[in-house]
Image: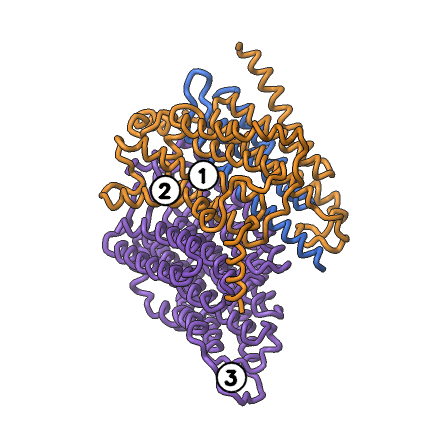
């Protein structure tokens, strides 16, 4: 594509993205705002593809637009009738009516000033000689990293510690959600069309997740994209009113939730015990270790994202769960 | 000793996983993990004391390509304080929560919070700091909303949103620095960052984001409700450690990474905001009706003192006077950590035994709960800044530095703030020593009351008397 | 300095500003959560713009990894925020 064509494309894309962001935040109808936000997310994924970031595009589409959108829509759906004016307690200003013109203008100017300073700083940063020591270092060490996709190499090898902590962040979020209450009530059983769709969509999603996990070593993909796709399969099952959505129960559920962090820690500490640095994979084993960690991470990510969508610990079914409940009642006395 | 750094992060994280998988023995696992982590912190401290600043490259990749962990005198001392405070609060928490389900929900989040604190204090990489900040924020919010009551959940939600805003601004600053210098490693950046639009903007963004998280006036509005409605052990750690972590980052950025970029004018701005915090916080603490609110406002005020040091550190030329001021800053931060944690734990005991924490109705707690009231008194000594507490040494250095640099405003603010602190502490103690004699014997439950007493004693006595070795340790830091 | 880079970076700044404005002004908590997500998307756009080195060179993978991590962190925070909102509404209905 010639540069003029690309420029026009970029212009249209960016204009649409900014327009969607504006519209999403300007509307008073929260539901419309959320849907516009999802569209914004999808166009962002296109932008990431345009900027040669396919891994990020996949993740944005699946997690940023897809799962966030699903969470927000479910929250909008659950919103109760409008509260009495005195009941808003969590807004920075007491109620919408009190936000005067002055405050609006001050905040708008503040935000514009922020954008301006940020742009000024960025332009100055861009104008200095481009620093590429990290890309060069990555290119040099890519062969020893065990994978050939540089983003996977950064995520699972060079900066694996960040990914370990990020999995801990996911776990923390779900534990917080658990402590706030039980899961949302499910949906009613799907009609024939949706049920038919689910019947083939879910296996395709599961296959796609496996593929994304495997291919992440040498092409765009990886644990996060795979985990999100797997979670999407669970979300679809849930929306179709199915009782079983692929999540184990009780202890097995906790194992799956913690699998990512556990395997990561185990690998790291074992390497430490063997005399290597923490998370310093030996080059011969790096590929295999990364795949091992990614598989565990995919399961954890899928489980935690699905649990986040559920909004809490799913109601246990069966004899074992009833016994657990009984035991807990006794310990509470 | 570098293994101690890994241990400090891996132990609480493993403990969190273990308490989640084995809820029935969660308390024992948690206390055990706490002890092990404290030992690791002690090992690290002794390592830094003997070998100087330590660093560790995770994965063996050179810093820049990989993530580096760094520990110097400052971070080792803060890690030790984190360990001792968290351990004491853990012991208290084992007695505070009554039901198995409460404990099962509490321990994993608590240990994840501890992991986040340690990871933050040890991190030597900018983006890694962002991730640790997020882990810290989410676990703190989840713990703050644990009671499920409306006030707690509303305050926790506000805390979360404010925290996210702060994190986004921090990340924007990180992007600017990466765009300009091509690396995320703190040590490398401290050599490379030069004054210019990108550095100024990055500094402003990151500082503002962190000021939101450390609740510096006027960005403090979220703190009093969040800390006052959280469960007592959580409030202790929130006030003593979590806000301190964000302050530590401001300190690191200003003195390390952006050392060539910060201007005295910017430091004076921070100092003025700190002065506002001291006055506003102390005034509201005096007017508070509930003990927990008083303690929360007191945190806002005490953090203000820490920011008063910034204009001094920039105005004083490099040398013994500046080193003493830096030492005073750390001493004040450490003392506040222990004192505030002890105070919140003591308030927790009162709240559980008396059923409320209204100051006016404290009639006679000195007789019913003598150990706890003594703990409050000791914590009060440290909060006011009376000798021999570490806060006295810290404030003394603040005043000495102010005189040396000729900045008299901080003198006035410190004096007024300390007077107000004395007023609100004595108000509490006055109500605690009621007039009516209490007929029954006071009952002391060790697990509940000793942690508060030990923490407060640490603040009021131990830290002050161990000033000299600490000063020496800090020479290895700032 | 590539035109594409500058174009996307400036747009990113605009989106950050839009998000900040929305986060500070909206009375509805859900819209503020959306606004914070928009702000995050703006920062991600800045990072990806920094990573882009033109059609000839492969992009810098580090900001891509950072944005991936950021997306996951953002969804975790959003999920927790929404759970808090849900609990808050449940408490209010009980009154």
Q: Are marks 1 and 3 in contact (CB under 8 Å)?
A: no
Residue A299: assigned label: 1
Q: Which chain is blue?
A: C
Residue located 59% across and 42% down the image: A243
Number of residues whose C-alpha sits closer than 10 Å to that of mark 1, classed few (under 14), some (14–19) or many (20 or more):
many
Camera-side residue of A32 and B395: A32
C-alpha gap between disc 1 and disc 3: 56 Å
Q: Chain of mark 3?
A: B
Q: Are marks 1 and 3 on the same chain?
A: no
Of badges 3 and 2, nearer the viewer stands 2
Q: Chain of mark 1?
A: A
Q: Position of residue C1 (x, y in %)?
A: 47, 21
Of badges 1 and 3, nearer the viewer stands 1
Q: Position of residue B237 (x, y in %)?
A: 47, 60
Residue B321 in sight from this viewpoint: no
Q: Which chain is orange?
A: A
Q: Position of residue A15 (x, y in %)?
A: 63, 23
Q: Is residue A222 above or below residue A307?
A: above
C-alpha gap between disc 3 and disc 2: 52 Å
Mark 2 lies on residue: A264
Q: Which chain is purple?
A: B
């Amino acid at each position: 594509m010639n540069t003029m064509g690309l420029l026009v494309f970029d212009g249209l894309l960016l204009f649409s993205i900014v327009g969607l962001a504006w519209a999403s935040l300007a509307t008073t109808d929260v539901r419309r705002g959320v849907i516009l936000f999802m569209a914004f997310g999808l166009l962002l994924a296109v932008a990431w593809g345009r900027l040669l970031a396919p891994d990020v595009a996949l993740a944005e589409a699946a997690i940023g637009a897809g799962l966030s959108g699903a969470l927000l829509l479910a929250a909008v759906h659950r919103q109760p009738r409008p509260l009495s004016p005195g009941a808003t307690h969590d807004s920075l200003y007491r109620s919408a009516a009190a936000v005067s013109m002055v405050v609006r203008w001050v905040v708008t100017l503040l935000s514009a000033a922020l954008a301006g300073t940020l742009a000024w700083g960025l332009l100055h940063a861009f104008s200095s000689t481009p620093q590429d020591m990290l890309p060069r270092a990555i290119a040099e060490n890519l062969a020893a990293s065990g994978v050939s996709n540089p983003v996977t190499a950064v995520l699972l090898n060079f900066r694996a510690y960040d990914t370990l902590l990020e999995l801990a962040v996911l776990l923390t979020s779900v534990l917080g959600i658990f402590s706030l209450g039980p899961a949302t009530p499910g949906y009613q059983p799907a009609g024939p069309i949706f049920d038919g769709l689910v019947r083939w969509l879910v296996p395709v999603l599961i296959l796609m997740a496996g593929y994304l996990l495997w291919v992440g070593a040498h092409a765009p993909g990886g644990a996060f994209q795979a985990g999100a796709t797997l979670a999407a399969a669970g979300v679809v099952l849930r929306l179709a009113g199915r009782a079983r959505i692929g999540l184990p129960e009780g202890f097995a559920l906790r194992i799956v939730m913690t699998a990512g962090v556990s395997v990561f820690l185990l690998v790291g500490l074992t390497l430490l015990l063997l005399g290597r640095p923490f998370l310093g994979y030996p080059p011969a084993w790096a590929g295999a270790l990364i795949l091992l960690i990614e598989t565990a991470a995919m399961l954890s990510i899928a489980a935690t994202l699905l649990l986040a969508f559920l909004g809490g610990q799913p109601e246990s079914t069966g004899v074992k769960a009833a016994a657990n409940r009984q035991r807990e009642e006794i310990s509470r006395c | 000793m570098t293994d101690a750094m890994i241990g400090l992060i891996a132990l609480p994280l493993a403990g969190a996983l273990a308490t989640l998988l084995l809820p029935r023995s969660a308390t024992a696992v948690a206390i055990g993990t706490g002890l092990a982590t404290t030992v690791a912190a002690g090992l690290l401290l002794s390592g830094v004391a003997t070998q100087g600043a330590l660093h560790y490259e995770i994965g063996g990749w050179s810093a820049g390509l990989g993530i580096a962990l760094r520990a110097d005198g400052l971070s080792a001392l803060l890690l030790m304080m984190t360990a001792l405070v968290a351990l004491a609060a853990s012991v208290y928490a084992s007695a505070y929560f009554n039901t198995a389900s409460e404990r099962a929900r509490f321990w994993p989040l608590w240990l994840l919070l501890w992991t986040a604190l340690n990871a933050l204090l040890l991190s030597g990489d900018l983006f890694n700091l962002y991730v640790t900040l997020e882990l810290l924020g989410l676990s703190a919010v989840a713990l703050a909303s644990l009671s499920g009551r409306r006030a707690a959940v509303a305050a926790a939600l506000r805390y979360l949103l404010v925290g996210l805003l702060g994190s986004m601004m921090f990340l924007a600053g990180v992007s600017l620095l990466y765009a300009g210098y091509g690396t995320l490693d703190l040590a490398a950046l401290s050599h490379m960052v030069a004054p210019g639009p990108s550095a100024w903007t990055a500094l402003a963004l990151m500082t503002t984001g962190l000021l939101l998280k450390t609740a510096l006036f006027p960005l403090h509005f979220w703190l009093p409700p969040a800390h006052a409605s959280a469960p007592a052990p959580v409030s202790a750690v929130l006030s003593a450690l979590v806000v301190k972590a964000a302050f530590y980052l401001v300190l690191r950025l200003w003195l390390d990474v952006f050392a060539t970029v910060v201007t005295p004018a910017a430091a004076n701005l921070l100092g003025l905001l700190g002065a506002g915090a001291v006055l506003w916080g102390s005034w509201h603490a005096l007017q508070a009706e509930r003990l927990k609110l008083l303690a929360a406002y007191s945190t806002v005020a005490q953090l203000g003192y820490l920011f008063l040091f910034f204009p001094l550190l920039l105005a004083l030329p490099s040398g013994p006077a500046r080193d003493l001021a830096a030492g005073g800053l750390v001493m004040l931060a450490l003392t506040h950590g222990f004192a505030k944690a002890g105070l919140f734990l003591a308030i927790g005991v009162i709240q559980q035994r008396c059923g409320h924490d209204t100051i006016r109705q404290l009639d006679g707690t000195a007789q019913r709960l003598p150990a706890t009231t003594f703990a409050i008194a000791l914590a009060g000594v440290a909060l006011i800044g009376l000798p021999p507490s570490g806060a006295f040494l810290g404030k003394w250095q603040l005043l000495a530095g102010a005189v040396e640099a000729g900045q008299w405003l901080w003198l006035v603010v410190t004096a007024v703030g300390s007077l107000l602190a004395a007023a609100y502490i004595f108000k509490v103690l006055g109500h605690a020593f009621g007039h009516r004699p209490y007929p029954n014997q006071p009952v002391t439950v060790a697990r509940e009351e000793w942690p508060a007493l030990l923490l407060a004693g640490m603040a009021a006595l131990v830290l002050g008397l161990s000033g000299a070795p600490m000063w020496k340790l800090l020479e290895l830091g700032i | 300095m590539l035109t594409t880079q500058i174009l996307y970076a400036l747009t990113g700044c605009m989106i950050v500003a839009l998000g900040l404005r929305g986060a500070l002004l909206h009375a509805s908590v859900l819209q503020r959560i959306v606004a914070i997500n928009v702000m995050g998307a703006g920062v991600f756009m800045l990072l990806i713009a920094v990573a882009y080195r033109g059609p000839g060179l492969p992009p810098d993978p580090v900001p891509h990894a950072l944005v991936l991590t950021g997306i996951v962190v953002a969804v975790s925070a959003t999920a927790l925020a929404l759970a808090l909102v849900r609990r808050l509404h449940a408490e209010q209905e009980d009154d």
